[in-house]
Structures are given as structure tokens and as C-alpha cells.
Amino acid sequence: MTNDSEEERISNLLANKHICTRCLLRFRGLRDADVYCLKNDEILLQFKSFSPKKATTVRGCFSCFGILDDSMAQEHADAIMKAIDESKFEFADFLGQLSLCPSFAIHQKLIELFLAAEGIADVRTTPMKQAWKWTCGPILEERLGKLYSMDSRFNVHIQTQTDSANELCVRLMSLFETAKAKRIRRTTFTQAEVNGALSRVSLEKLIEICGPWRPLVGLDIVVTLLHEPIFIGGRYNKLSRTLPQSPWLVDGERRRDSSVEELISVPIREWLHCTATTFSSSGREDVDVRTLGRGRPFLIECLNPQLVNSIAANTHRIEETINSRTSEIRVSYLTVIPKDKTDTIKIGEEDKTKTYRALCYCPAGIDDGELARLCAIGTLDLIQKTPVRVLHRRPLLDRRRTIFSMNYQLVDERHFYMELKTQAGTYIKEFVHGDLGRTTPNVTDLLGKETDILSLDVLEVDVEWPPACLLAADKAVMTSDDSP
Amino acid sequence: MDEDIHSFSHEPYIERYYQRRYSADVGGQVGNDHCILYHSNKVCVVTISRLHPIVTEKKEISKVDFKITEKLNRTINSISGKKKKGAQKLNGKSPICKVDCSDGTSYNLYACVRGLLIEANERLLETPQLLQQCPNAEGYFCIIMAKLNEDVLGTLMTEEAYLEFVKSRPSQPVQEGTNATPTAET
């Protein structure tokens, strides 16, 4: 802690250097939030040791470019309000985040080195971002009518820019760059590079770079509003045999104009007014496979959503919207998922069981006895080489998978249904026809006759989703005519 | 149960997924015809034709050898990743294996397609007779991922063209094979 007389000295040294009141407080090491948020005049009154001509409200402080100034703070609040009004963001609280361009660090270093050279042993400057938070936080709270909170999911991000930033960086970095770097003539540098240079630069050089003590102008801000992602999950049924799960592109062209992913994501994006979503699910099915039963678990991450207030209570309305727009899929159990529960959809993916129904065909004919003998085998351990049909986009591997049980239903002398309970990741089609012997054992070999698979349905994806605790809470909100 | 079972295509899966093409008298050996099963994803499964003497004369195969030179063995092909890094590069004339029959004849089998060798069928080492028993399916001898712009379908013979060629080929007594004859013209 700088003692009183040192603080006096600091005030005197920085007296005519165009440093604003709050920056003076910063260099004096003051960390009292309640002081920073006072109006300028009140601060001056409090610190009687500041005589009016020593502390000035300068527009364009040599240290902070004016960002800690009362009226500048109001201007920035205006800009933020404008951005909010032009958007559809709904928020209960906010977090202000300031990004400082390199000019700030460079000027700060100059002042610190200057003070050190004048004999101030230990300059413990209060960080700019902290001072800004204490100064502007209350102003923004008042203007927005919402609380400033560290836990807020809504970020007001302010990026500072100054005209001088590039120039200062280049001059600073050119003191340290190698001959090779000089030839490349870089103009942008990382924070780490600038900090590294600042730790080595001398006061004299810095004075050359920054120029004389004077009011600084040319501060601009860019306001970005960001809401943390919201996760929505549920289960989907795929009732079409011509719909891909995700957008299907071949050589840049769409094969089909829709997909499960889009049919679910687009209405959700509309409700939340968000521009980007990512879709993930507990496994996938082929285009020609239906998903029946409870359906396959899916999760949608909605990036930078705006209309967040009504979402939790309206998930069944969104479900209805999705279901009414198409007969190719059906969504159920739609609910908001808290971030910490989102990975349960993927955990233990390899361990999960899936149940399928395959319509099989033996051109040579098949009878009850043969099928009974096949299904009596019970558990089967398979080795599946990567199927030829996906070899172009999957690595060549031997996959060990287990068939837990098999049941059959004869349809006629050549057709039968087989219900299989298998380990996740089993290629069912290949288990039936054998994929040129690359899946062993396989039904064709076991029956001793050519067997083909005509159609496949997923009956059950055995994953607890949405997470049970949420479902119970949600049931209280759902109406009676909701999903199965 | 809710769908009409006859609404589904009953074509055998090989015909559904693959298009057949042929290369005749491969390696300059008369009758040494190969069949290339071309999948829509550009993966090619290469087999001997059902009209190959090994099949038509039901030859007994004593050995299938994938060793080409001291340093090159088609079964020693370690590949990693989706892009099949490390796979042996092949052109149409690359030899894949040598087949020795108990009647003293032998045949060299070739890639026929330019691309990367994905798999040499090691089952033929233990069960060489597969070549003769299932020429158009399990008896394949290699799988090749064709180069992207390789026009496999355009440069190799169609079923029709192949049968024409065989008819006009001297000496070989041709029997139509007993294996599934494709009816669809692809």
C-alpha cells in the first residue's frame, strides 16, 4: 500500500499531465468501489488534498483516453442502449466486459515507469478494467434498469479502439523485432507480444513512442451483445424413409431439400431469434431407416439466443409447431437442458443398447424351424470390418460388437421380421447380408442361405434422455394432450 | 407391419449397391477376366468374373499369394484415418496377387482401377477356394478406393459389352455361370 505522502507525491507528479481524476485514484492505488462511482465533483470534495488545479476532468485523459470520464460513460451507455433496442434481447441481468486495445497498456507503462523514475518505489495501480466496472457499472445499471451481475448469462461486450493503437504498437515492437520480422512488416501483434515488449522497454523510448503529455482523443467503442447458449433437448421419431438426418450434400449440391436436423432446428431458431444452432444426437440412422418408439435423443445448442424469457414454459408450443409443419418427423419430450446435464446424451454411447426391426428376405425360402434355431443362439459376438458403403468416409477398422438377443416373426415363405437388441454402433444391414463376408458371423452364413435386408426400423434407443430429474419437473408444466 | 413388404426393392444387395464392370484378358492372359463391383461412393470391390476359367472349370486352387516382390506385399498395408493414409497406391496394371491351381495353371490378378488399396482379402490365404466358389461376392480379392476423378464406369466394359466380347473371343468354351446373373442393365 502506498502511504499517504507517497500518494501526495503521485498526485503532484501527475498534476499537469492531463490525467483524469479517476486515473489519479488508480495510480494512487485506491480500490474502493464506492469512491469510483461518485460523480467527479464529489470525488474532488472527498479528497481535499486534490486542489482543483491538481485534478482535472479532462476529456481525453492521457492514461484512459477518457473511458473513465462521467460524460463519456453516459455516451457509451447510449451506444449500448441503442444496440439493445435494435435487438430482441431479453435479459434479467447483465455483465459488462471491457476489452482494451494495446494503447492502454502502453500509456499505462509509460506513467508507471515515469513514477518509478521519480522515486515512487512501488506503484500498485488499480487495473483499468476494475475501475471501469466500478465507474460505469452503476451508470449502466441505471440506464438499463437491470442489475450488473458476475453470474449473468447476458454479456455486454465493449471493444475499445483508438486511432493511435496500430502506430504505437508498430513503434514499440520495432524496437525489439529481429531483422527478419522487420522485413515482414507486421502491423498486428498479440497481447503477449506487446506485454513482453513493455516489460523490456525503457522510459526514454516510451516517451519517444507516445509523444508528449497531452489530452488524447480518438477513442471509439464497438458494442457486442452476447447471450450464453441455451440448450434444448428432446427425442425425435423419423417416419420417412427418404429424409436424411443432417443436410445431405454431394459435391456441394443438396441431395434432398430437408433433413431431421433442419426440421427441428429452424422452428427453434425462430422462437429464440437466434442465428446459429448446432445439432447433436445419440447416434444417427440412415436415410432409409425409420426411428419409432420413444425416439432418438437429440440436443440443440442455440448460440446467442435473444428471446429467452418464454422458452422454458413454451417448449410444448414449439413441439407443436415443429410437428405441425411436417409429417416426416415427430418431436417429443422437448425441454430446456441446463448446461451441466448436456453431456449425458453422449456419455457411454458405446455401452448403450439399441433395438431394431429388420424386414428380411431369403430368395431360397425360409421356415419357422430355421429361424427358431437362429434366434436360439442368443448372444452373438461379431467382428465387423468397416462396411464398404461407408469406407470412403470412415477409417478401416475391425469393430467388435455384440448382438444381445434376436426374435423373429415369419411373414411368408420368403419374408420374415427380425427384432434385434444390439450394442450401440452395430451395423445391422451388414449383419444380415454379411457385406461380402466382412461381418462375421452374419445371418446369411448362420442360416446357410442368401439373406437380404429390405427395410430397417429403429425401435428403441436405450438412453435416459431428457435427464430424469428434468422430466419430472416438466411434467408439471405439460398439458394432458402431450407426446407419448 | 404397417408397410407393404412388396413395396421394397427385392434386388439382391450387391445389385442395389454396386454397378458391375468388366476387364477382359487382364495382364494379357486370355480368359483372365475380372469383374469390378463399383459402389456409388467410388469404392471398388474387385473379383474374378463368373466366366473366368477358375469358375467355369471349377478349378481347385492350391494357393493365393499376395507377395509381389521382396518388399511389396498387398496384405501388409497399414492404413490410418478416413483419408486412408499409408495405403498402397495402385494403377490399373498393378498386380495384386497370384493364384496357383492344382492343375498347374496360374493366373495373375490385377487392380484394374487406379486408386488406393484398401484391403487385400486375407481370407483367400486360408480359404483360397472362396475365389472359385463365390466369385462375385465373398471371393473378392481386393478393395480399392478409386481416385476422385477416375471414370471407372466409363472406361471399363459393361455387362453387355463384356458378353459380346466373350462371344467373339476364340477358343474358350464359355458356359454361363450358375451364380446370380444380373438382369438389370446398368
Image (cartoon, coloured by chain):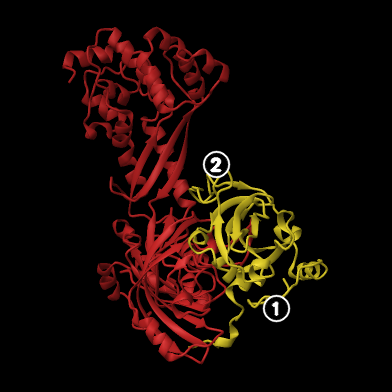
Q: Name the residue under label 2.
A: B70
Where residue B93 appears, as percent x and y from the top left, is 69, 50
Pair 2/1: label in front? 2
Q: Residue A81 location in percent, x, y?
A: 43, 46
Q: Position of residue B181 (x, y in %)?
A: 67, 77
Say which chain tag 2 marks: B
Residue drawn at x 43%, y 44% is: A80
Give the percent coordinates (x, y) of residue A198.
38, 18
**Residue denoted by label 1:** B183
Q: What residue type is labelled 1?
A: Thr
Using the image as rendered, state which of residue B77 and residue A118 is in the foreground: B77
The reply, left or right, for residue A265 in relation to residue A308 is right
User: Are discs 2 and 1 located on one and the same chain?
Assistant: yes
Mark 1 belongs to chain = B
User: Residue at 50% of width from left, 19% of height from top?
Assistant: A170
Give the farthest residue toward the bottom.
Answer: A412
Query: Dot 2, how many residues are within 10 Å of its Cα: few (below 14), some (14-19), or many (20+)?
Result: few
**Where does the C terminus of chain B fall, quadrant-wise?**
bottom right
* Chain coloured red in this rendering: A
Rendered shade, chain B: yellow
Instruction: Name the amino acid, label 2.
Output: Glu
